[in-house]
Image: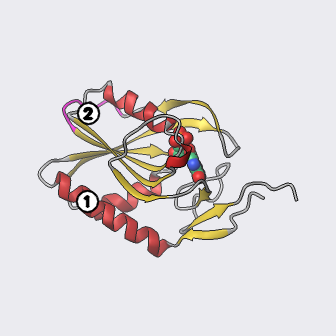
Amino acid sequence: MTEPSRIYLSREDIAGLVERLASEIGGNYRDRSLTLIGVLRGGFVFLADLVRQLQAPVRRVDFVRVESYGAKMVSTGRPQIVQGISRESIAGQDVLIVEDIVDTGATTAAVLRYLRRHGPASLGLCTLLDKPSRRQVDVSVDYVGMTIPDHFVVGYGLDFDERYRDLPDIWVIDPERED
Ligand code: IMP
């Protein structure tokens, strides 16, 4: 079954998580100016909400696009940065990566490796959702909206085979069953 089966986090739940994260991040970066790097495609909705709640000066918003998942619910190999940050450097800047979900950690590790090469002054990581039980690559997450068990979730930017990104709530897709 690859249809969303039940709401896991309502839009109100999500708004609460975003508000808390924005206040945590705002408290830590109040006197610095932040460069936010969203991870496409899944992170676009979360970043859009977060940036409007942040009580910290935002110097720049940019995006990287990473590909590794095909039409399946499992990773299809080593993630590739298929679209990098624009030419202006992040060297010497306080950078915060904004992700939708950290699963095995491979995507995050690839983004961290890529951005470190550009010499930021600091590199933080914020994710709306974290699935630590699936971790294969050790990454340290600075800001977590919510830790979730091993569910495949869609909506609020998250897709299954490019579908469901537009759903305002986050839904669970149950794994296919041989009934
Ligand atoms: P990782 O490299 O395994 O950590 O996977 C990270 C990427 O996989 C995320 O940025 C998502 O695009 C995708 N992903 C992982 N889990 C889910 C999920 O439950 N729903 C939708 N996409 C997911």
Disc 2, ligand 1: is the CB inside 8 Å? no
| Whole-percent x, y for residue 132 in the image | 49, 48
| Whole-percent x, y for residue 12 in the image | 45, 75
Left or right of 16 in this view: 74: right
Left or right of 70 in this view: 34: left
Magenta stretch: includes residue 52: no
Range shown magenta: 86-93
Q: Nearer the viewer, residue 97 or 147?
A: 147
Disc 1, ligand 1: is the CB inside 8 Å? no
Q: Which residue is pictured at 37% across the width and 41% down the height?
A: 140
Crowd rating for badge 2 (residues with CA inside 10 Å; few <14, some 14–19, many 20+)? many
> What residue would you read off at disc 2?
90
| Whole-percent x, y for residue 166 in the image | 57, 62
Identity of the residue furthest to the right in this view:
179
Could you tell me if residue 56 is visible in this image?
Answer: no
> What residue would you read off at disc 1?
24
Say which quadrant the N terminus sits in.
bottom right
- Name the kind of residue labelled 1 in the image: Glu
Q: Does 145 appear above or below 69?
A: below
Quadrant of residue 139 within the rendered picture: top left
Q: Does 93 appear above or below 161?
A: above
Could you tell me if residue 5 is visible in this image?
Answer: yes
Q: Nearer the viewer, mark 1 or mark 2?
A: 1
